[in-house]
Amino acid sequence: MNLELFANELLLDIFEYFHAVQILRSFQGLNRRFDTLILTHFQKHRFDFRTASKKDFDSVCEINLPLIFDQISSLGLSNDDEIPHQIDLFRSYGWKLDQFQNLSSLSLDHIRSGDIVCEVLCECPQLIHLNLNSCYFGGKQDDILRFVNCVWSLPKLTYCCLNMSFKHGLTMPISNNISLSLKHLSVLGVSYRIDQLTQLCEYTPHLQYFTFDLSSTRSGEEIKKSISSITTLNLVFVGTQHGIIENLLKHVPNLCRLKIETMYLEMNGHDWEHIICRCLPKLKAFQLKMRFEVTREKHRKELLNSFQTRFWLEEQQWYIRYHYNLDDSSKMICLYTLPFSFSYLDIFFPIHFESTCPQDDDDNQYLSYNHVQHLLYRSSLTNNIIVSNLHFSNVTQLSITLPANNNLLFIMKKLDRLNTLEVSRSKSMSNVDAQLQLQNILDLAPYICSLRFNSWREGQFQNQDSLRTGRLTPIVLKTRLIRQVNLRGYDWWFNDEECVLIRDSSLMKSCEVLFIKVQNRMNLLYLINSLNNLRALIVQSRDDNWTWNDYSSST
């Protein structure tokens, strides 16, 4: 079929299924109509370099970007292991962000220096959206403050998401600058203390939407002044003192939406009802997820009954569900409001559910798990009863520990969007069973492009031949489309012979990015000279004396 026969609207819809580099390499220069459509596309969609190969990146920066840079409204750059120093490469072609006059949104991934971020942000004061993902900042506390001041000084910044971590001992400071534009703020990976929030809101007076972690709050710290601007609050809290939560919520009187995730915090329905009725008169939406220990069946029943009062079932119609593993000695339960509204869920089979929802069946919309994107699956094999009312239609990342029971295969049949698989194996599992189960998973998930081994332990082997076979179990897997393979969690340092087997395996046919541990650097020659699609090789060598301190000192 001739694409030129398609309407412009349909072609623009098709463009949304391609990465930015793919669009330019496939369609730019065909004719004037396609060039105009490409400009229209990038006025509304991100120009994302974060998945580009070095070859494509160089080509686009030199050839394509000069033709469209003044139309780009959103840009993504990354310094991760696949494309290290991408920002420096971007600048080496003479590009600076102040040349992108229509740029309003910027995403930066895996940056390991606050100074680099500040240099970039100084070139684009017109930003409205800023997203930092998986960034790490070492240095000193003053460096963190300088970075925060830089963000708060952007005069038009309205939406800001900071997903980052700091060197041990560094904390999240409050800016010395006042931002009159910032309304939506998410800070993930680092936490605030509750006694910082008053000053934060004084320096961010129009803040309406706030996502943050309150786990670093210590006993005795509290907020003493109401924060009237905040209407939406997403909160993470790890701790046991529900007085901290109550102290916060009684100082946000205009809160309309509350989403909260806690760990170890024991609060029942009566506790939450008391706080909501007393402190949050304007609350319209309440989304809750709690994980804590309940040791006795009697206490679990009392917990369920506390969410079955008139307030929960009739006035608000907020229903809850909880589940726990029948064999888990820790007695941890996971309790959440329905429908489940969080992106991460840990399921440990065999599992038992209880719910206050009036119709706890497959067709009930309240039982949807459509928000789950990352599913962690574990099982003990004492029970193979299938739980049929678990539907994870939007999961893109699955983390599993083998062995698995029949529920995994049932769930896998519905994971059409799964693209990332992280797999671990218990020490007691046989090599044959591990290989069969992992192969079955790959057969049921044809769109997986990233495979990571997290702790693939050696079993108990009878002789050296079976030992080597066991080590190489994943290498004989049959698959075609996996683009990224991470063998660093594999508990072994590969030698020459094993690198040859890796090179010749079907697992490597489409591999572009490989993470591996080797006995010595010379082992890599068998991979570098033969894997034609390989564009990034991240290696840990046993004969290398390198440490993480070396990495930190070089950034």
Image (cartoon, rainbow, N blue to C red):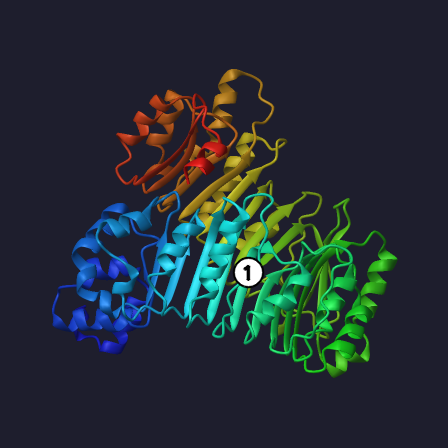
Q: Which residue is mark 1?
A: 187
Question: Which percent across, then down, holds residue 132?
Answer: 45, 57
Relative placement, left or right, of 324 versus 512 is right
Identify whether 502 is placed above or below 253.
above
Few, some or many C-alpha atoms within 10 Å of disc 1 (few <14, some 14-19, many ≥20)?
some
Question: Which percent across, then down, holds residue 424?
Answer: 56, 39
Dot 1: element:
strand
Name the outermost residue toward the left.
Answer: 31
Quarter that holds the N terminus:
bottom left
Which three-letter amino acid code belongs to the residue tagged 1?
Answer: Val
Nearest to the observer: residue 198 or residue 374: 198
Relative placement, left or right, of 476 versus 196 is left
Query: Can I make out residue 413 in this image?
Result: no
Q: Quadrant of residue 540?
A: top left
Nearest to the observer: residue 250 or residue 269: 250
Identify whether 27 is placed above or below 113.
below
Query: Can I make out residue 273 in this image?
Result: yes
Name the outermost residue toward the top.
Answer: 463
The structure residue drawn at horizontal position 18% and vertical position 73%, both measured from the top left corner, is: 36
The structure residue drawn at horizontal position 58% and vertical position 48%, both measured from the top left corner, is: 170
- Give the tally of numbered discs: 1
Question: Which percent across, then down, holds residue 526?
Answer: 31, 26
